[in-house]
Amino acid sequence: MRRRGMILILSSPSGAGKTTLTRMLLQDKALDLTLSISVTTRPRRSSEVDGVHYHFIGRRQFDLMKSAGDLLESAEVHGACYGTPREPVMKVLAEGRDMLFDIDWQGAEQVREALGEDVVSVFILPPSMKELRARLDRRAEDSAATIEKRLANARREIERWRQYDYVVINDDLQRAYAEVTAIVAAERARGARSAEGVEAFVAELLAG
């Protein structure tokens, strides 16, 4: 049955597992989720591919997109600008498909304001701050000072959990993944989202 697509937002503090869950969701072909690719003004890293990890653009182009209303959400972080192009998102929704967003609470708030009932938001929590620190340590990507900064930011982000539709505690990755996929299935079946398709089906059913 035809239905309108939805926006699935995953947010979490650094180290809670959002990126891993995002990758798992995208690899599940049965879910058929499309990843939203942001634009950014920061330089491309050697490991990144333009159009896959980000769309890398200049500051002037970013400002023009923002002023024209072509960005659903935007933020400036450490001197670089990030944003979500509006047109690809609206195209996916109109096709009855679902788009996955890997963004922070600020971006989630802006997308929710722009698209309202099309948005389903999930906040991923670590099982403890001790485990969160251990995960950041195991990455071996950041200095001790950077890890402390990430943990301080994590506490502020965690306090935003009430802004989300669902909360998943990632104490076991497979269980957390199962919870997120259950959320996707339930939201896809929500009456308001599939009303057009259900109405057509019911009319045909009753006419038989």
Image (spheres, rainbow, N blue to C red):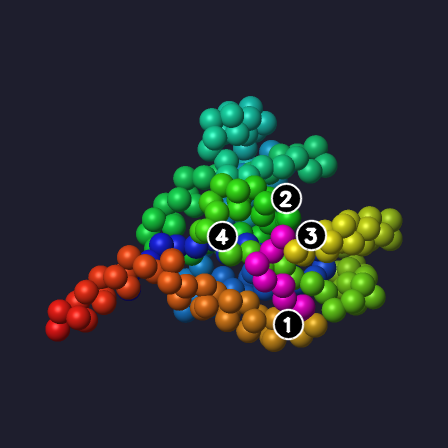
Marked residue nearer the N-terminal end (3 or 1): 3
Label 3 sits on a secondary structure element that is loop
Mark 2–mark 1 distance (CA, rounded to whole Å): 25 Å
Point 28% across, 64% down: residue = 198
Mark 4, residue position = 119
Say what amino acid the circle numbered 4 marks.
Val
Query: Is any atom of residue 182 visible in this view?
Result: yes
Say what amino acid the circle numbered 1 marks.
Leu
Marked residue nearer the N-terminal end (4 or 1): 4
Label 4: how many Cα within 10 Å (few below 14, some 14–19, many 20+): many
Point 28% across, 57% down: residue = 196
Q: In this view, does 162 lie to the left or right of 143?
A: left
Label 2: how many Cα within 10 Å (few below 14, some 14–19, many 20+): some
Query: Is any atom of residue 18 visible in this view?
Result: no
Which stretch is magenta? 163-170
Depicted 158 relative to depicted 86: above or below: below
Quarter of image, res 188: bottom left
Q: Which mark is residue 160?
A: 3
Depicted 86 relative to depicted 203: above or below: above
Label 3: how many Cα within 10 Å (few below 14, some 14–19, many 20+): few
Quarter of image, res 18: bottom right
Name of the residue lying farthest toward the left: 208
Point 12% across, 73% down: residue = 208
Say what amino acid the circle numbered 2 marks.
Gln
Q: Is residue 103 left or right of residue 208?
A: right
Say what amino acid the circle numbered 3 marks.
Arg
Label 2 sits on a secondary structure element that is helix
Marked residue nearer the N-terminal end (2 or 3): 2
Mark 2, residue position = 106
Residue 165 sits inside the magenta stretch: yes
Mark 1, residue position = 173
